[in-house]
C-alpha cells in the first residue's frame, strides 16, 4: 500500500503496539507521574536540608534522577501519542504481522525458534520478543508459512523458513 503527501510522514512515525504493550507503557507513565516524581521531589527536599548545595552530592544525584524521570515521562508521552494499537481481531495467521507468534527453522543453526513480533517499545531479546523494525523482525513481516526469508544482521546473513504463525 502506498501513502503520499503528509500522510506518508505521519504513518512513518506510528509505532505499532499490542494492547498488552500499551497497558505497560500507560502503567509506567502513571507510576512515574504519581509516585516516582513525588519520591524524587522528597529526595531533593531532604538533600537541600543537608547544607551547602555546591558541595552536596545527594542534591546533585537527586537532581540527576529528577532529570531522568522527567525525560522518561516525556519519552513515554511522545510514544503514546504516536501508537497504533494492533487489536486481536486484526491479527490473522495468514502472514506475519505485529503481534504474531512465529515458529521458524533457522537454517544456519539447524534449529527451531519461536519469536513474537512486537512494536519496538515492547521488544525484549531475552524473551524472544523481536521488534518489527529489527533485522529479523522486518524480514519476517508479511511472510507466510512455508516461505524462507533472509535477515541481514550485524552478525551476518540468517535464513529462516516459516513453520507456523499463530496469535
Image (tube, rainbow, N blue to C red):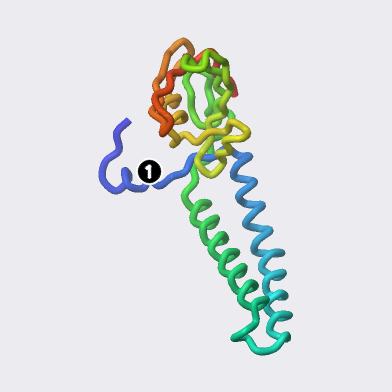
On the image, the x and y values in percent for residue 130 come to 53, 33
Quarter of the figure with the N terminus = top left
Asked whether 89 or 17 is in front, the reply is 17
- Report the residue marked by disc 1: 11
Specify the farthest residue to the bottom: 52
Q: Is 25 left or right of 161, judged from the image as shown? A: right
Asked whether 38 or 6 is in front, the reply is 38
Q: Is 62 left or right of 136, judged from the image as shown? A: right
Asked whether 118 or 111 is in front, the reply is 111
Specify the farthest residue to the left: 5
Say above or below: 36 vs 114. Answer: below
On the image, the x and y values in percent for residue 128 come to 59, 31
Category of crowding for the residue at label 1, using alpha-carbon neighbours closer than 10 angstroms: few (below 14), some (14–19), many (at least 20): few
The answer to which quarter of the image holds residue 73 is bottom right
- The structure residue drawn at horizontal position 53% and vertical position 17%, both measured from the top left corner, is 104
- The structure residue drawn at horizontal position 59% and vertical position 24%, both measured from the top left corner, is 167
Q: Is 19 left or right of 34, judged from the image as shown? A: left
Asked whether 165 or 5 is in front, the reply is 165
On the image, the x and y values in percent for residue 139 come to 41, 26
- The structure residue drawn at horizontal position 53% and vertical position 35%, both measured from the top left corner, is 118
Amino acid at each position: 500500500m502506498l501513502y503520499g503527501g503528509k500522510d506518508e510522514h505521519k504513518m512513518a512515525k506510528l509505532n505499532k503496539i499490542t494492547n498488552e504493550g500499551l497497558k505497560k507503557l500507560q502503567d509506567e507513565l502513571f507510576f512515574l507521574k504519581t509516585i516516582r516524581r513525588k519520591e524524587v521531589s522528597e529526595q531533593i527536599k531532604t538533600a537541600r536540608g543537608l547544607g551547602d548545595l555546591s558541595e552536596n552530592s545527594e542534591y546533585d544525584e537527586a537532581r540527576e534522577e529528577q532529570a531522568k524521570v522527567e525525560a522518561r515521562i516525556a519519552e513515554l508521552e511522545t510514544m503514546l501519542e504516536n501508537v497504533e494499537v494492533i487489536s486481536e481481531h486484526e491479527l490473522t495467521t495468514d502472514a506475519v504481522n505485529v503481534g504474531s507468534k512465529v515458529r521458524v527453522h533457522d537454517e544456519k543453526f539447524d534449529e527451531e525458534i519461536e519469536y513474537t513480533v512486537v512494536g519496538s517499545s515492547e521488544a525484549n531479546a531475552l524473551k524472544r520478543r523481536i521488534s518489527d523494525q529489527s533485522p529479523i523482525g522486518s524480514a519476517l513481516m508479511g511472510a507466510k508459512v512455508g516461505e524462507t526469508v533472509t535477515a541481514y544482521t550485524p552478525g551476518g546473513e540468517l535464513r529462516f523458513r516459516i513453520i507456523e504463525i499463530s496469535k
